[in-house]
Amino acid sequence: MCLNDENIVILYRYEIEGLKPEDLLGFFEKWPNPPNPDKRLALLKNSEHVLIAFDDNNGKVVGFINAITDKTLSAYIPLLEVLPEYRKRGIGGELVKRMIGILNDLYMIDICCDDELAVYYEKFGFRKVAGMVYRNYDKV
C-alpha cells in the first residue's frame, strides 16, 4: 500500500482475476495505434508476471506493469502504464521496484523505452544500451 500527498491510497495486486477490458481504458494515450481494451486484457493474461495498481477510493485501475521471462536467465518488461492523471505520485516507480523484486533472481531484466524515458529507468539501476526493435504497427 502507498499513501501519497493527496490522501489517495494505492493498492497493488499481483493477479488480474476479475479484471475486465473496460477497466483498462485511458492507457496507451501516446501510442499511434494503441491496443484495444480486449487486447490489453489479453496481454496481461498472457504475461508471466503482472502487477496492477488500484485507487482504493474508487477501485479504478490506475497503472500496471508486466513481464515476460524464460524462467531461467532473462526477463523483459514490455509495459509500464500509469493513467495520466495519476502520474508524478510514485505509482510507476513502485510498480517498477516491485517487478524488479519479483525478477531479481534472474541474470538480466530488460526494458526498451524511448530516449526521454531512459533517465527515469536509470533511477532503478537500468543502464542504457544499444538495441534494435521491429514493430508491426498495424498489428496492435
Image (cartoon, rainbow, N blue to C red):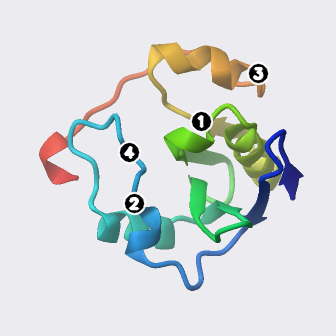
Specify the label residue 123 is tagged with: 3
Question: Disc 4 designates what residue?
Answer: 28
Instruction: Give the secondary structure at mark 2.
Output: loop
Coordinates of residue 38 in the picture (x, y in percent): 31, 71
Coordinates of residue 8 in the picture (x, y in percent): 77, 53
Question: Disc 1 designates what residue?
Answer: 110
- Closest to the camera, between mark 2 and mark 4, is 2
Closest to the observer: 121 or 48?
121
Distance from label 2 to label 1 (Cα)?
26 Å
Q: Which residue is found at the position 66% from the left and 39% from the top?
A: 109
Coordinates of residue 17 in the picture (x, y in percent): 59, 83
Quick check: marks 3 and 4 in contact, CB under 8 Å?
no
Earlier-in-chain disc, 2 versus 1: 2
Earlier-in-chain disc, 3 versus 2: 2
Distance from label 3 to label 4 (Cα)?
23 Å
Specify the label residue 129 is tagged with: none
Q: In this view, does 3 lie to the left or right of 58?
A: right
